[in-house]
Amino acid sequence: MANVEMLMPKMGESIIEGTILTWLKKEGDFIEQDESVLEVATDKVDTEVPATHAGILKKILVKVGEVVAVGAPIAIIESVSDSTPISEKPIIEPEYSSSKEELLSLSPAQTATIISTFPEVEKPGEDDRFYSPLVLSIAKEEKISKSELSTILGSGKDGRVTKQDMLSYLKNREASTIGKPDFSSTAAASTMSAPRVEMSISAQDEIMEMDRMRKMIAQRMVDSKRISAHVTSFVEADVTNIVLWRNKVKDAYKKKEGEALTFTPFFIEAVAKAIKDFPMINISVDGDKIIKRKDINIGVAVALPSGNLIVPVVRNADQLNLMGLSKKINDIANRARINKLSPDELSGGTYTVSNVGSFGNVMGTPIIMQPQVAILAIGAIQKKPAVVETPTGDVIAIRHKMFLSHSYDHRVVDGSLGGMFVRKVADYLEAFDLDTEL
């Protein structure tokens, strides 16, 4: 038997580190290969990490609550299979440079190794958070003062600022400011940070700490409003054909597929078709460059039992038919509610849809998911009297109608494009064929 290191696995695109939530096994336990050993929280999702080898969990190297880089060792397994012993693994001495470009291009494993060789650094000012040498080096290169650094929200344990937090902050700072302001004075720093509002608290009030996900949501929503010039256009759509067709087939569909046929697949299908007609909605902004996305990956906002929102992504939505969309959406929504999504299923979205109608809302003004440039809110379907044109003249009839609320980034999406796009989505919904085969 040989001792092998169990490393923090790569858990998805852009994930560079994770926080240890809990160990599901203890030292001395026998574990099977691929058996879950611990639970890790990333900035996208909580997930269980399986064992890389079968054997005895000889030593746990990281404690609950610690932030660990991808590729760093987290445990030692006394393997029952032939593996390379730890002592035989080559030791690579990292080279360190204070150059910002080199710092930002380091792999997660190199970052973890570099940080482990540095002495603990004093906390800046009155801020009681720990800052790693890498974070402080980036701050120094970017001329971020101690007071400005203390305003950066961290996604690590106890609000610790990570390398990814610094990258996101720098990107947002460059996009939202013209030139670099001087943060050397307290007055200049205070103009860039949100003012703290004094509030009175009575004995009957309850004070609750934000959970990790709520902190991340809060930061991303504020960042999005600061980055993008939000504009919202509204269109009312007649979805009577969709309602009638769904009512006709929903029982047969549930009996055949074992799951419900919701309205969401109809909305996603219409959005995917409209994106193909207006591809400049399917873009991202990188500084003064526009990135036109080839794939149509639509995020679907899902409400969790905790009250938080999560946005899993339907990849290549334009290549799925109505039934394929239904099965995919039901699958990711169900797994999202029980925390079984992988990080990759939460990244790569190019456009987002939020069904606010499921909460009884008729319309909304949704906030864009960065780095996307648009998001559509779907309102509740309501019966309304409407004028209907017939061959023998206009009549008043009861129709099923709903509002579509389209928020878009006015930096790159003008009102004509934003308005025509949401109108096109409504046109596809209204033109649904009642003779569609299930």
Image (tube, grey):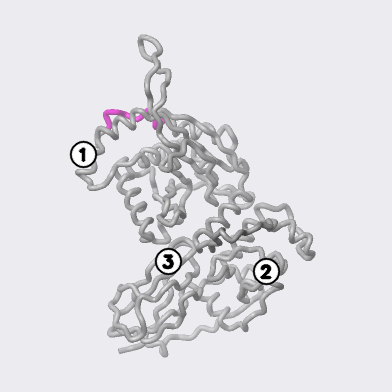
Which of the numbered marks, if any, corresponds to residue 252?
Answer: 1
Residue 309 left/right relative to 168: left
Amino acid type shown at disc 1: Ala
- For this rendering, which residue is in front, 209 or 242? 209
Q: Is residue 209 above or below residue 393?
A: below
Amino acid type shown at disc 3: Met
Residue 36 left/right relative to 360: left
Q: Distance of mark 3 from mark 1, alpha carbons? A: 39 Å
Residue where numbered disc 3 is placed: 11
Q: Is residue 434 magenta?
A: yes
Instruction: Name the residue at 53% across, 56% down.
Output: 217
Q: Is residue 165 magenta?
A: no
**Crowding at label 2, few (<14), some or many (≥20) Cα neighbours within 10 Å?**
some
Numbered disc 1: secondary structure: helix
Please report the bounds of the magenta region as a residue range: 427-436
Residue where numbered disc 2 is placed: 139
Q: Is residue 77 above or below residue 279?
A: below
User: Count of labels shown?
Assistant: 3
Q: Distance of mark 3 from mark 2, alpha carbons? A: 27 Å
Amino acid type shown at disc 2: Ala
User: Can the viewer see residue 217 in this picture?
Assistant: yes
N-terminal of the pair, mark 1 or mark 2, is 2
Front of the two marks 1 and 2: 1
Instruction: Name the residue at 70% across, 53% down.
Output: 177
Q: Main secondary structure of the magenta part?
A: loop
Numbered disc 3: secondary structure: loop
Task: Find residue 7 and report its image quarter.
Answer: bottom left
Q: Image quadrant for the C terminus?
A: top left
